[in-house]
Amino acid sequence: MNKRLRFISIIALLLAPAALSAGGRELPVVGEEAPVIVEELEEYEPDIQQVVFIPKGQWLTGVSISYDQSTQNRYQFLVLEGLSGDTYSFKVSPMLGYAVRDDMVLGLKFAYQRSLTKLENADVVLDTENNFNIDHLYSLAHNYYATAFMRNYFSIGRSKRFGFFNELQMMLGGGQSKMTTGVGDSLSGAYETNFKLDVGLAPGLVMFLSDYSAIEVNVGVLGFSYTHTKTLKDQIYEAHRRSKFANFKINLFSITFGAAFYI
């Protein structure tokens, strides 16, 4: 028994300097610690293709125009009776932007708005005992606005023709208006100047008609507005009015349409 063990030990000592390999890995030598095998793993990068809707370096320019006019002749609505007059409102807003990186545009908007109201007569009837009359009302207002905006674009699927944008904007502006009521000795008038600050979020939809032209529609959703108005009545009485307003819902009356050109 002892001879057999001695023979096996001699064979092991003779084979100790040799390194055996199997499957590309080095086998440990009898009586020595097994070597640590460290394999480098290749970095896995998922193949995700992102569609660039507005590439970096592209210029954006466009304009939106709105016009509204109405005429009433003895019109009746709720508490208003015998409403007769004409009104119109006009607004033009050019814009210019630049893509500082893919799908991100920084830019400026400028706007001018003019509105005119000529009201010949209107009766406000609350009940049989409470009613009053407004006649010969004339109002003219001019307003100017400048807006800085930032847009992020998102394509619909892999389409490069239809996409969404999310616009963050800050607007500063002001204007003046005058209003008169009555005629002759009952004539009374007021002159107003105003300042306005708006900060808001206006998402929208863009549809390319060609490689360089598109139609845009957006709607105001979130925002904060501050207005300060100074009124001088009959060149004697002075008054100040301040208002703050926060909006956290979709405002269907703030939907705007416009044409844009991507150069």
Image: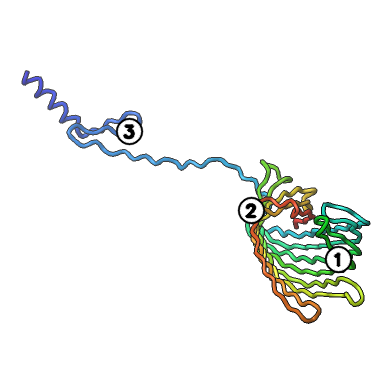
Tag 2 residue: 248
Q: Secondary structure at mark 1?
A: strand
Q: CA distance from mark 3 to mark 2?
A: 66 Å
Which residue is nearer to you in this view: 135 or 88? 135
Tag 3 residue: 25
User: Mark 3 or mark 2, which is nearer to you?
Assistant: 2
From this view, report whether residue 175 is shown above or below residue 162. below
Q: Secondary structure at mark 2?
A: strand
Mark found first going from the N terminus, 1 or 2: 1
Q: What is the three-letter code of the residue carrying label 3?
A: Arg
Q: CA distance from mark 1 to mark 3?
A: 90 Å
From this view, report whether residue 67 is shown above or below residue 231. above
Where in the figure is residue 42, as x and y percent of width and height? 44, 41
Quadrant of the rendering where the C terminus is positioned:
bottom right
Residue at image position (15%, 30%) is: 13
Q: Are marks 1 and 3 in contact (CB under 8 Å)?
A: no
Q: Are marks 3 and 2 in contact (CB under 8 Å)?
A: no
Tag 1 residue: 116
Q: What is the three-letter code of the residue carrying label 2?
A: Phe
Query: How crowded is the residue under tag 3: few (<14 C-alpha within 10 Å), some, or many (20+)?
Result: few
Q: What is the three-letter code of the residue carrying label 1?
A: Leu
Where in the figure is residue 87, as x and y percent of width and height? 87, 61
